[in-house]
Amino acid sequence: MVVEKLDKEKITVSFSGSVGKKGLDFIKTCIEDIEKNGVPKKVSQKVINELSREINKKVWERIKTERNIK
């Protein structure tokens, strides 16, 4: 997922099409939080890595379920 603040009034969010409904719900929650609290000035690499791992884990779990992989 890529989040860009293009200017004071515009934020662009890009993500994989395989994120699924749960992933979309999570992204929606994140966007609502940003709208409510503003864009964080700086996010640590640790937080970025944790979010990335969580999203990848959820996507992989969904793929395994869909393809009946154990």
Image: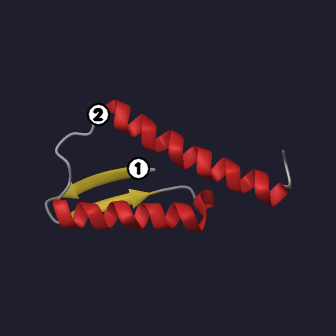
- Residue 8: percent from the left, percent from the top? 13, 60
Among the 4 quarters of the image, the one containing residue 39:
bottom left
Q: Are marks 1 and 2 in contact (CB under 8 Å)?
A: no
As drawn, which residue projects farthest toward the front?
Answer: 70
Badge 1: residue crowd in 10 Å (few <14, some 14–19, many ≥20): few
- In the displayed structure, does residue 48 sit left or right of residue 7? right
**Residue in the picture at 56% in, 55% down:** 16
Whether 1 is drawn above or below 47: the answer is below
Whether 31 is drawn above or below 59: the answer is below
Q: Quadrant of the C terminus?
A: top right
* Secondary structure type for disc 1: strand
Identify residue type, mark 1.
Val
Decide which of 49, 70 is in the foreground and name it. Answer: 70
The mark lying in front, picked from 1 and 2, is 2
Label 1 to label 2: alpha-carbon separation: 14 Å
As drawn, which residue projects farthest toward the left?
Answer: 8
- In the displayed structure, does residue 27 sit left or right of residue 65? left
**Residue in the picture at 25% in, 60% down:** 34
Identify residue type, mark 2.
Ser
Which residue is label 2 attached to? 44
Decide which of 16, 67 is in the foreground and name it. Answer: 67
- Residue 6: percent from the left, percent from the top? 23, 56
Looking at the image, tell me whether mark 1 or mark 2 is earlier in sequence order: 1
Numbered circle sitting on residue 64 = none
**Residue in the picture at 17% in, 60% down:** 37
Badge 2: residue crowd in 10 Å (few <14, some 14–19, many ≥20): few
* Secondary structure type for disc 2: loop
**Residue in the picture at 84% in, 48% down:** 69
Which residue is label 1 attached to? 2
* Structure colour scheme: secondary structure
Decide which of 59, 17 is in the foreground and name it. Answer: 59
